[in-house]
Amino acid sequence: MNSLSSTKVEKFYYLMRLGREFELAAKEEYMKGNIAGFLHLDIGQEACSVGSMQAFDKGDVFTHYREHVLAIARGMEPKLIMAELFGKVTGVSRGKGGSMHLFDPSLNFYGGDAIVAGHLPLATGCAYARKIQGEKAGVFTIFGDGATNAGAFFESINIAAAWKLPLIFFVENNYYAIGTRIGWVSPFEELYNKAKNFMPAKRIDGMNVCEVYKAVMEAKEHIENSLGPYFIEAETYRYEGHSMSDNGKYRSEEEMDIFKSRDPIENLKKEALRLGIVSQEYFDSADQKAQEVVQEAVEFAAASPEPNLKELYEDVYCKECTNVIP
Amino acid sequence: MEYKITMPVLSDTMEKGKLIKWHVNEGQQVKKGDVIAEVESDKAIMEVQTFKDGVVKKLLVKEGDEVPVKSPIAIIETATAQAHAQQTPSQPKEESHPQSSTSSQTLPPELAAILPTKTKELKTQEQKETKASAVVKAVKGAASPAARVEAQKLGIDIEKLQAEQKLPKPAHLKDIKLEALKRYFTPKALELLQEYALDPSVFAHDHKIDADEVQAYIKSHNIPKTIPLSTNRLAVKSNVETAAKKPIYHVYETFTLNPPEDVKITAYLLKVIGDTMQNHPLTRAVLEDESYKIYPASNISVAVAKGDALYMVVCKNIESKNLKEIDTWVKEIKQRDYSPDDLQGSTFGLSNLGMFGIRAFDAMINKKDSGIAAFGKVDKNRVEAVFTFDHRILNGVDAAKFVSELKNNFAKGIDV
Ligand SMILES: Cc1ncc(C[n+]2csc(CCOP(=O)(O)OP(=O)(O)O)c2C)c(N)n1
């Protein structure tokens, strides 16, 4: 953290706090019946979402379904996301995608693929296109530990490495694919081993936003210099169940306590105060602001209209795409 | 301000929820994020949190109640949290001492934790208890969640038993249940329980139950032992069921045999029947839709008992084998395992129960065979045979010609 400016640290803190408040509100609204479908919360993993998106500020982003905080950190407005969760027409995907599908081409954010590892070949294809175009900014893709057991994962790291594509693979190793612990279905729990023969691969502390930020910065430099893909494994943990209908009770209390003691938000704050680079007043006002923004987002979503029935026939085919390679 | 906590919607398919357990009492102070109850959805038991700080004003449903989603289950008073906390009747008596209670509530938690007041002791004790009952303590070892819960209930140490290789890895619910039963039943008694598919709960679990006790129960209640059919028995079952659906009739005849010495009687029967089949094409036929398929070879399926199992093993190309070769085939047939090829391709069958002293019997036609000959005990060169024919393939005249030629051929005898 020493080498980071205090404004960066403040930004990390605010975005993570905003993300967590957003998720808690989403959880509450889901329980009230205002949000339907699936809802996968990122609580506990905010450092991965915020650190990576702050570092990877240009280029294309392909994500899995646990993507609210990524979208926020990418710059998507919380109220548009909340409205999307509510299925309202004001939502970022006009209410048709919901929690798992937050797409915004203007932010190069292709987010929320519901098929585990399904977005990895898409990211690979996009990286291929970017390479052919000779563009500098590459592609970032994020996925869970479960996805590293899929065939699509191996095919993607293989071809990305063979063709030296500008692609960052970022795995959030939260140890569980729903209730399946990674070690039960994989010969080891340290997943960077799966990629290290293909490309530079490292394991980092995914509960530490500064470490995530630095690792992604390094990776970005690597891909921008046409050195091929880069693999990051971030060790992290989700405090909630896999989705709203999962109670997460397959994990022990001890394990949960260990990870909660490494909470990315509280620890960032503690460390910044210790070093004296951010004031207590900032944290208080950031907390306050995050709550207000989320409160507004919920009110906006609740007050927004449902999509019109004829919306069903809109956006079935893409008419005009911006930010997409012709 | 009143903040209503409602029965949460925990999945798209959830319509009602059951309140399993309250984690708070009326009057208790709660903080945002605290678990206040456990509810059962259509998928799992889940925790309900409060999203606001306050005091629990009223619990609107009882443990065990089932209510529709979105209906209120509790009211939290958010504005005047502290005032209420002091008035509520369910607060412990010691708490009514105004000084200690206010001071511990207004102090930051870190400070409250080190203040040596009675209130503090009481509170932490209380908190510990709720925590312990709220979360099932983790059981170590590799096991399914259901197995863990059961092991927890029964106090079974999965990790230790796995280290001693007394439990499989991972352990499943059935393994834990079996482990629990071992406390009350001797190994022999457990075997009997399984053999007779007995419900272990019919025995009082207050002493070690041995095989004699279980046996006595089985006798006195006349409980049958269930033996599932082996694959072979299942195959035989389906064969004879199809056989029973065929239009058949019987021909009875007594033959005089002249078997050479040193060969098995079955080999002799096979050779004579096989040769005779060469003059009777329909005995080499199978029926397929609207036509006969007549094969050149004399292939006979022979009933072979091996232990409990019954096989119809096919002796092939009898017409081109000599008696010695067939005898060798018959002698080794009991010794070996059969390939699918050994069990198909026949058009006629032979069954022999003479070695059991049976005088005469009839047999079921094997698969698509045109008929089968059943031979009884040879008594001074005389033997009774019963033929079963598929009437769709051979009619009475065809059968009569075949059997009478067979009779001549048996009388003639053959060279070895
Ligand atoms: C191809 C495919 N298989 C199964 C599923 C069901 N499913 C949804 S999420 C998930 C677990 C994925 O776990 P992980 O990749 O570790 O990501 P996490 O949710 O932990 O972030 C599964 C199995 C799916 N969506 N797609």
Image: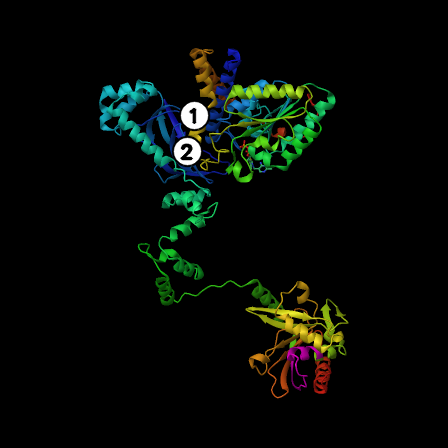
Mark 1, residue position: A261
The CA distance from mark 1 to mark 2 is 12 Å
SS class, disc 1? loop
The crowd level at tag 2 (other Cα within 10 Å; few <14, some 14-19, many 20+) is few
How many labels were placed on the picture?
A: 2
Of residues B26 and B379, the one nearer the viewer is B379
Q: Indicate whether B245 appears above or below A143.
A: below
- Among the 4 quarters of the image, the one containing residue B215: bottom left
Secondary structure at numbered mark 2: helix
Name the foreground residue: B68 vs B405.
B405
Q: Is residue B72 above or below residue B200?
A: above
Q: Is residue A120 left or right of residue B156?
A: right
Query: What residue is drawn where x is 60% and y is 19%?
Result: A218
Q: Which amino acid type corresponds to the residue marked 2 in the rendered image? A: Glu
Q: Please report contact status of discs 1 and 2: CB closer than 8 Å, yes or no.
A: no
Q: Chain of mark 2?
A: A
Residue B66 is left or right of residue A148, and the answer is left
- Tell whether position A61 is magenta: no
The colour style of the image is: rainbow
Magenta includes B254?
yes
**Residue A268 image offset from top left, x and y in percent:** 47, 18
In the image, the segment drawn in magenta is: B250-271
Give the quarter of the figure containing the C terminus of chain A.
top right
> Mark 2 CB in 8 Å range of ligand 1?
no
Image coordinates of residue B187 in percent, x first then y, are 40, 57
Residue underneath mark 2: A253
- Pick whichever of labels 1 and 2 is earlier in the sequence: 2
